[in-house]
Image (tube, helix red, strand yellow):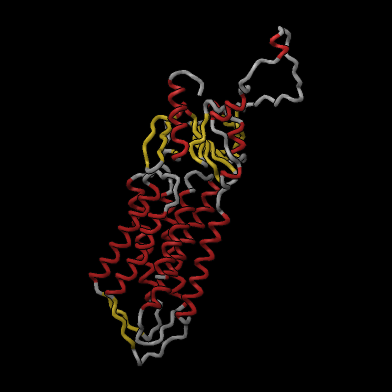
Amino acid sequence: MLSVLLAIQGAFVALVLATRMREAARQSRLVLLAASAVTLGVSIWAMHFVGMLALHMPAPAHYLLGPTLLSFMVAIVAVAGAIAVVANRPLSSISFLLGTLLMGAGIVGMHFIGMSALSAGFLLTYDPVYVIASTIIGISASGLGLHLAFRTGGSGRPPVVAAILIGLAISGMHYTAMEGTTILCVPSVPPATGLSPRLFAATVSVVALGISLGFLLILKPARAAEEPALAPAAALSRAAPPPGPAPMSRALGSEPETDPESQPPPRRLAQSLPAERQGRTVYVAVERLRAVHANGHYTTLADAEGEALCLLSIGSVEAKLDPQRFIRVHRSHLVALDAVAAIERAGDGALAWLAGAATPVPVSRSRLAALRAGLAARAEGQPG
C-alpha cells in the first residue's frame, strides 16, 4: 500500500507541474519539465524498492549501487522525454503515442534494471507471459493517464484521476512482473555488500516525498484569491452613480458643485502591455489580445503572434483592460469576448474555444453564466 501511494502521489505532483508547461514561458517550461521528470522518476524508483519489501526473499537482499543508479537515470530520462513530447502544443496523435511509449518504456526499463541490482547471491528467471502483460499494463495505463491530463483540454481541476491511473501503471506493472519472477538463492555465491533494503526503502520514501512536495510548494503559482477580480457587472456598477434624488443645486437649475479631490480618478485603460517574446521586449496591443493566463506571479499574454511573458500579475493586467471586452472566466484565465468562438460543456464547468487557438480555456462553473451573458450582450450590440 505504501508503494502504491508513493507512485500516485509522485504522479500527481508531476502532472500538476507538467500541465503548467503549456502556458509557461520558455525558461519556466524548462524548470517545470525538470521538476516534473525528477518527481515522477523518483516516485517510480521509490515505488519499486518499497514494493520489494513486500516480497519474502529466500535470503537477506542487498542492492548494487551501479545498477540502482542506472535504473534511476533511465526513469528520469524516459519521463522527461515523455512529458516534453506530450506537453507541447498542439498535441498530435503521433506525439501522444510517442510520449506514451516513452513513459511506459521508462517504467518497464526501470523495473528490470532495478531487479538486476540484486546482489550476485540471487538467480532471477522471468515468465515471458508476465513480462508481456506487465509491459502492456505499464504502457496502456500510462497512455490513459496522459490522455486525461493533456488531451481532454483540462477543466482547471487537479489531475487526480490521471495521477491515479499513472500510479497504478507503475505499481501494476511492478507487481504483475513480480508475479512472473522466480528468485533462487545461490548459496555458493556470497552476497555482495550493498544497501540494506529496509533502510534503503525508508530513505528513498522520505526523499521521494520531500522532493515532490518541495517542487509543488516552490513552483506553486500565486492564488487568484490574493488579487480578487471584479466581475464586469460589478465593475460597471461601481462606475455608475447610485440611484436617488437629484442634488438640490441641480433641481434649482444651478450647476452642481463638485469637489475634485472627492472624485475617484478616472480608470485609465491600457493600449498595450509590456512583455517578453523570444528574448525580446515587446508591447502587445490590447486590441489584438485574445487571452491572459496567470503564470505564477506573472502572466502569459496570447495574441495572433503567439504567447509572451508579462511581468504583471493577472489582477494588475485585468485592472488595465476594458471590462466590457475582457472577462475573468477562471481564477487563472481572462479572455476577450470577441475572441470566443464556441463554448463546450466539461463537467461542472465549460471550455471556451478561442479563434485561432489550438487548446481551449477552462471556464469555472461560477463564471459560466457571466460569460454567456457577456457574449449575448455583445452579440446584440449592447454594453457587456
Q: Nearer the viewer, residue 58 or 155?
A: 155
Q: Residue at x 57, y 44 (%)?
A: 225
177 versus 343 height, above or below: below
**Residue at the top extreme of this rendering:** 253
Q: Position of residue 189 (x, y in %)?
A: 37, 90
Q: How many marks?
A: 0
The image quarter in which residue 312 lies: top right
Q: Position of residue 113 (x, y in %)?
A: 38, 72
371 versus 133 height, above or below: above
Residue 120 shows in this picture: yes
Q: Nearer the viewer, residue 236 or 49?
A: 236
Q: Residue at x 48, y 71 (%)?
A: 205
302 to the left or right of 181: right
Residue 74 shows in this picture: no
Q: Residue at x 29, y 66 (%)?
A: 134
**Residue at the left extreme of this rendering:** 129
Q: Position of residue 216 (x, y in %)?
A: 53, 57
Q: Nearer the viewer, residue 376 or 353?
A: 376
Q: Position of residue 61 (x, y in %)?
A: 41, 83
64 versus 13 height, above or below: below
225 to the left or right of 67: right
The image quadrant where one finds the N terminus is bottom left
The image quarter in which residue 284 lies: top right
